[in-house]
Amino acid sequence: MTRLREAGRTAEADIVETGVLMAEDPGLIGRVESLVLESGLPAEAALAGAAEEIAMELANLADPTLALRADDVRSLGRRAAAHARGGVAAAAGGVLVARTLGPADVAELSATGVALAGGGVTAHAAIVARSLGIPMVVGLGPDVLDVVDGEEVVLDGDSGLLVLSPDAARVAAARADEASRDTARTAAREHRLLPAETRDGHRIVVLGNAASVAEVIEAGHQGAEGVGLLRTELGFLEARAWPLRGEHLAFLKPILERLINQIATVRLLDFGGDKTPPFLKGAEGRGIELLLESPEALRTQLEAIVAAGADTQLRILIPMVTSPEQVRAVHEMIEGVLDGRPVPLVGSMIETPEAAQRAREIAEVSDFLSIGTNDLTQLVLGLDREHSKSAPVTDVRVLRLIDETAQAARAAGIAVDVCGEAASDRVAMPILVGLGVDELSVAAARVGEVRKWIRDLDYAACRDAAEGLTRPGRSRSS
């Protein structure tokens, strides 16, 4: 916990701290005592057995999010049993292969990567791993446990693969990739003060996407001019009710305190779809639609955002906007929570074909627009969320909607941002620049890379290429 807090990772430290509270659970303690006193088991076996009993109960729950907590309980049992034997569960360098891991296990790892037979990407262990920059692949199945200690493997976190007995070329490629990433990160930090400006003088604002203090710090080190997308819902995916004001502030303050006088774009809770907490199970809406159905919850979050972000260039981003009426409703509610504080800019996320087609109406009541290319591409091309990770944003149907949105922003005299994966895609990014996008908001680790790409571009060429794709046969002067 100390290492996490010192690195500014308060949310992740809280996850580990939850394990401490779990260890103090009277139900768990009672089961341990019963196994020792009534069954005669030694302490280490009783600790592991009691934890396994509770883990099995959790694993059988219908709620998949709660079921993933079974791994955390098993981890607690393993660690407690190890201490009872007089040892400490630990892991050395290399790739750690295991059935499951809990967040405390991950926080203490010296491994360079983790491959799990079970687990899930929303489990606390995976959250801590991402925060610490430890590559982790989950859900590989029981066969992965057959890997022999000392066997050479290649962990491909991007593809979610563990390659056994890799050939020399694969090993060399993995090492080269790792060295390349380290070199690029070093260069990004060294060049953080260089402008993100094309060769012919067109400037683009590069911001970072974030959900934690660690990401804000990394984005800043690589030259980000602030945050273009602060995801507020990820810490509340297990919530049993709408977050309280204090809970919002506990998340927001450590992050926004690092963005004094910088752009801080805070997205309202984007619940729904694959980000639905237990208390909203069965809800059909998404984003602002759900928030407007619970106006007190929306007001509570707005109050917290305005209070926490008073010293930043605060922007509030509305997710899944479909109509100008939704934007007006948020504007009106903000007026009632300012309490003398500066008025933040209010932006609309354009993430559906319907929103893009109404972009001019939405732009008229917005202070900026932000295009969520992940959902937009998925919906335009009819792909599921898994496939949309590699969906072709350069499909002309998607590009025309982006072009329509950018034109709407220009007509309204407001900025337009892209915060989806396309903003850091080597092929798509120059097209977005050519379409007139003003800002690109990208993953913290990609900020420096994207800024370098921009410096290598010629804006006039990008504009011609973009118009050739979206409006073939039409010259730039027409």
Image: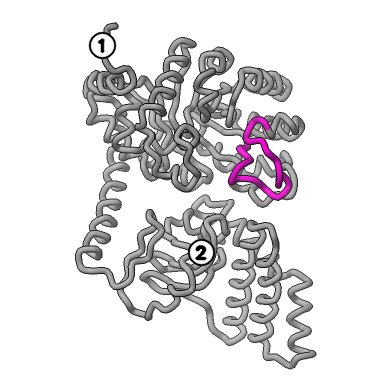
164 displayed left or right of 4: left
Q: Residue furthest front?
A: 382
Q: Which residue occupies 74% across, 86% down? A: 35
Figure quadrant of the N terminus:
bottom right
The image shows residue 215 at horizontal and vertical percentages of: 46, 45
Q: Main secondary structure of the magenta part?
A: loop
Q: Distance between the residues labelled 2 and 1?
A: 57 Å
Kind of residue at disc 2: Ala
Pointer 2 or 1: first along the chain = 2
The residue closer to the viewer here, 82 or 366, is 366
Residue 329 makes an appearance in the image:
yes
Question: Is 309 within the magenta?
Answer: no
The image shows residue 32 at horizontal and vertical percentages of: 73, 81
Q: Which residue occupies 42% across, 79% down? A: 146
Give the quarter of the image for residue 425. Answer: top left
Q: Is residue 54 above or below residue 314?
A: below
Q: Mark 1 points at which residue?
A: 475
266 displayed left or right of 97: right
Q: Name the residue under label 2.
A: 107
The image shows residue 283 at horizontal and vertical percentages of: 70, 41
The image shows residue 342 at horizontal and vertical percentages of: 62, 21
